[in-house]
Image: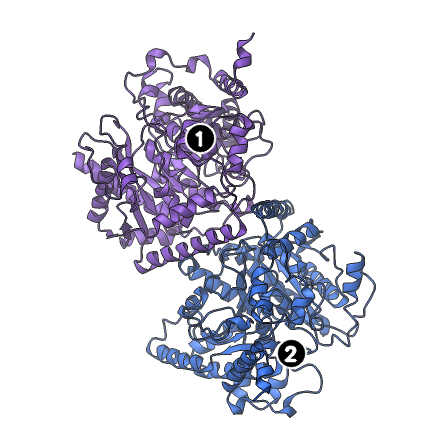
Chain colours: A blue, B purple
């Protein structure tokens, strides 16, 4: 009886939460030890473990979200069959990567059956997301379920009312079946916390799944979900999308309802506005989900939302005329891009140029000042909230939070500090707007990060993505391919000691085997429709080009 | 030689600025003493003084902005003739009410001649505001001209680059010919400052023209302008529109480019977001100007703008079906509405109900907490900027600023204060959104203020308008009629001592002779298109009703 007393309280809560979660997985969906492969790539396990039927493998493997909605509306598959297939595959993904937090399979199956009846009674009045299983980052609130966001202090406090986006998506026909893992503080690039533990990258479990929507990305790479919602204040949709080889869009602030989420900060602090955005297995699905949300009148669900226009016709005509002009930024001027990501960007640029798109080289200005301003913003309260909800609440910092070196006693910002931050930021926004206007740009492409997924607890760079949160441009990740044997380490780094140290992270194609490469596509601020269509268009061009090369 | 030394520096600068302004008015446009009427109503002077030709009287009197653009596009009047007519009538208005600050007649006439040539060369490619003279509040920057915004400290520092909206409107064909007066600090309800002096209300010069876009409103009441742009952080478009009997819309934040204006505050302070919006002699012109701006892609002119949708078709269909539902708030629960404004609201409600619109009574919740939060926000820097740019710069406070009792040493807000303000405000936004949704409202109508224009330096109430800045709803003023002999004072006040004192301001129809009455129409946040169309629709219904009553 003495031993449990020695277990710290946070471990007891963690054990209880995880045990409850695991109890919600039926025995028939449990992996055997022999199901695990010898290497670090677990992507094929759902296909080989024998838990999924042939039909379930087809449903979860061969369609994107747009196709799947059509199949259900047409009655080719029942919503229940589709939901069950994704519940099973998500359960497998959980066992392989620890990607889930709250499991809501029973609720999902009940709703699926309700939707099937609805369809039989009224097949012509189905929502645009009819029957679609959508996974959600843990921060979304669903009544009856926790939103711990990785804080032990928030465990066993089930949500009372749904987040605004949950209500909106429900109204369009979506089915929620699971929530996904994220980092303690939501600020690091590893989805690891003391409630749920660490999420692994299914392409290579020795690498991070990225943050902070890492659970979403790992789940999607295993096709335990084909569409979901992450959140992003410094790259939290894009970093895990890049790490796990899926598509993700950070919309402009306010475009998608953010209201009613569990927050890792005190209410009302004037941080860079966090956003939520789609993550999916296709660019088309990201665009479609964004379109459904914008057209559903988000300002009526969330008092912070923007009533964005959706001039799709005008945008598509731009695509038709082939008059797209983009800039390419090779790096951020501070961290040199590792060989696999450098090659991926070059391949993407070649593909786009070959298709007739004008590509203008660009150096992003003021990145160092911007990075300092971002850091000052994220620590404005002296990280008081982080400290209060972790170490001061008996919840020790996880290694990636320690590595980030952000959570520590520091001075609280004054009114002058806040005003200075806002004023500098507004100047930067004007400076960048002038670049977009002067060069008549439709998009900027650049690496999504200076590297692919890296070993656990080593990803400390946020600037490649955070700059677009700071400037509030929509930005997306397009997966390209994976690390190739020819991606050998080099000494191309040229920005000093920090860059050299960071470049040394890439030790070669063996350690980074199967890690996805990706690019980032940035759109004009509040022109999210254009960006989502451009991403779809560019992805088609780039992947057609890559397929041709492989022939 | 001794006497000029005794003149304070601010008076010398003021004398020099006013002398220069007056030197820009040709002698033939100067009023004689005999042109002034014996009473306080100067509205007819432009028609009787003999300075304007019959054609100029027609041009300036008989059209709204929409008509006038069409007349110029069709070649019925040259842009030069129209511009000259408005320059002359604005000069008359200046002499009657002191409504102008910077005069730009020469620049305007030169541009008018350029536009006339443009039209002759290419009559089919003219902008939607082709040739339209637009007046601007003094805070807008036009290269070569001061934007003192009523601060002596800002005199003789001509602007170098244009405000974003100036660039946008120029591109659509507008002609700028004058800027208009406003209050010291831009916070009081009287457009009075030590550079330009006080603007009078042309309906009754013993009453205030309102603030802070009081120059615009006085100019427009005299039809020295038929369309212009004011700004609004607590009612600065709506209060003068109400005081002077014109139309004005405060758009949602970011809908119209605000960037590049001269500000009465330090950059970057997290104030309630100020906005700019149309003021005009017709509801249709306000809607048209807003439409032109939104369709011109404001996000490409200003990095703070919203890419608002303009679903005009859908909105007009709502009007056709007559399914409009509105709420009416009789007052704010703190200040009782004086008899003329109470009657005007009642007449408007009757007209709308008679036309089949559903009207639901409402009490606005939390107005007292909201008022306190607004006050805390406006004084967050301990009014340091106001003090630095006025008394500490040798520019004494004008009486209305003294009366407001806002500008005085007070503590600076901390980060916790700012977070608390934001958190409470966000809760209020959610609370009000729920009301809009639960009652399925398209608009709320209420008084624009608890009174009409009042005697100078007595208007200290801002809450009727400021609440909608705080909640960020679009809100507009519709002029109804003027004070009537039957509008006798009463003792209806019921909210305590402050209300009693404030109610005593209304001393009866004699002192308030010819003061315009008005209502305020509030729309859903970021549904500015709907609001602007509703205002046009309601104005037509109400004025048709009033005309019938008069028969």
Residues at badges 1 and 2 in contact (C-beta under 8 Å)? no
Quote the CA–CA distance across marks 1 and 2.
Answer: 64 Å
As drawn, A346 above or below B375: below
Residue A202: image tag: 2
Residue at the left extreme, as displayed: B551
Q: What residue is rendered at 52% in x and 33% in y?
A: B387
Residue B248: quadrant of the picture: top left
Give the number of the disc on residue B84: none
Q: Are marks 1 and 2 on the same chain?
A: no
**Can residue A262 be spotted in the picture?**
yes
The subunit carrying tag 2 is A
Q: Position of residue A12 (x, y in %)?
A: 55, 80
* Label 2 crowd bin: few (<14), some (14–19), many (20+), radius 10 Å: many
Picture coordinates of residue A335, whole percent (x, y): 74, 59
Give B327 or A185, whichever is nearer the viewer.
A185
Q: Quadrant of the C terminus of chain A?
A: bottom right
Residue A124 at x, y = what percent?
36, 72
Image quarter for residue A203?
bottom right
Q: Which mark is residue B182?
A: 1
- Residue A17, relative to residue A305: is it above or below? below
């Amino acid at each position: 009886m003495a031993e449990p007393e020695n277990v710290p309280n946070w471990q007891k809560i963690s054990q209880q939460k995880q045990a409850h979660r695991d109890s919600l997985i039926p025995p028939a969906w449990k992996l055997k030890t022999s199901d695990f492969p010898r290497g670090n790539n677990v992507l094929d396990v759902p296909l080989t473990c024998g838990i999924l039927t042939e039909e379930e493998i087809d449903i979860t493997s061969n369609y994107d979200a747009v196709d799947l909605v059509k199949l259900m509306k047409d009655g080719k598959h029942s919503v229940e069959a589709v939901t069950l297939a994704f519940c099973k595959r998500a359960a497998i993904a959980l066992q392989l990567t620890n990607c889930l937090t709250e499991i809501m399979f029973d609720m999902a199956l009940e709703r699926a059956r309700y939707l099937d009846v609805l369809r039989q009674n009224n097949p012509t009045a189905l929502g645009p997301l009819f029957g679609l299983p959508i996974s959600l980052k843990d921060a979304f609130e669903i009544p009856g379920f926790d939103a711990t966001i990785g804080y032990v202090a928030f465990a066993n406090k089930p949500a009372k009312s749904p987040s605004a986006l949950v209500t909106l998506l429900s109204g369009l026909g979506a089915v929620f079946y699971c929530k996904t893992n994220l980092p303690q503080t939501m600020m690091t690039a590893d989805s690891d916390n003391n409630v749920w533990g660490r999420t692994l990258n299914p392409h290579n479990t020795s690498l991070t799944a990225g943050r902070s929507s890492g659970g979403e990305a790992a789940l999607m790479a295993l096709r335990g979900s084909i569409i979901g919602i992450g959140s992003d204040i410094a790259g939290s949709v894009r970093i895990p999308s890049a790490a796990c080889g899926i598509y993700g869009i950070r919309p402009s602030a306010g475009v998608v309802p953010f209201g009613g989420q569990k927050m890792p900060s005190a209410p009302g602090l004037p941080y860079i506005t966090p956003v939520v955005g789609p993550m999916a297995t296709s660019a088309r699905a990201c665009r479609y989900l964004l379109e459904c949300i914008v057209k559903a009148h988000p300002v009526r669900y969330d008092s912070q939302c923007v009533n964005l226009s959706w001039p799709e016709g005008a945008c598509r005509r731009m695509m038709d005329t082939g008059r797209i002009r983009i800039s390419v930024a090779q790096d951020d001027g501070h961290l040199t891009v590792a060989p696999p990501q450098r090659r991926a960007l070059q391949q993407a640029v070649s593909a786009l140029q070959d298709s007739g798109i004008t590509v203008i080289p660009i150096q992003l200005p003021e990145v160092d000042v911007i990075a300092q301003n971002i850091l000052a913003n994220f620590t404005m309260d002296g990280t008081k909230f982080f400290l209060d909800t972790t170490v001061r609440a008996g919840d020790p910092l996880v290694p990636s939070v320690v590595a980030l070196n952000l959570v520590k006693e520091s001075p609280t910002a004054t009114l002058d500090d806040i005003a200075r931050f806002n004023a500098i930021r507004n100047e930067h926004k004007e400076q960048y707007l002038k670049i977009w206007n002067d060069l008549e740009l439709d998009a900027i492409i650049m690496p999504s990060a200076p590297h692919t997924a890296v070993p656990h607890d080593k990803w400390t760079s946020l600037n490649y993505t955070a700059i677009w949160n700071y400037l509030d441009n929509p930005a997306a990740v397009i997966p390209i391919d994976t690390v190739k044997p020819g991606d050998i380490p080099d000494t191309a780094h040229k920005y000093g000691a920090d860059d050299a140290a960071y470049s040394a992270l890439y030790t070669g194609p063996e350690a980074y085997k199967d890690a996805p490469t990706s690019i980032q596509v940035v759109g004009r601020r509040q022109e999210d429709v254009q960006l989502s269509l451009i991403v779809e268009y560019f992805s088609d061009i780039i992947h057609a080009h890559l397929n041709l090369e492989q022939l």
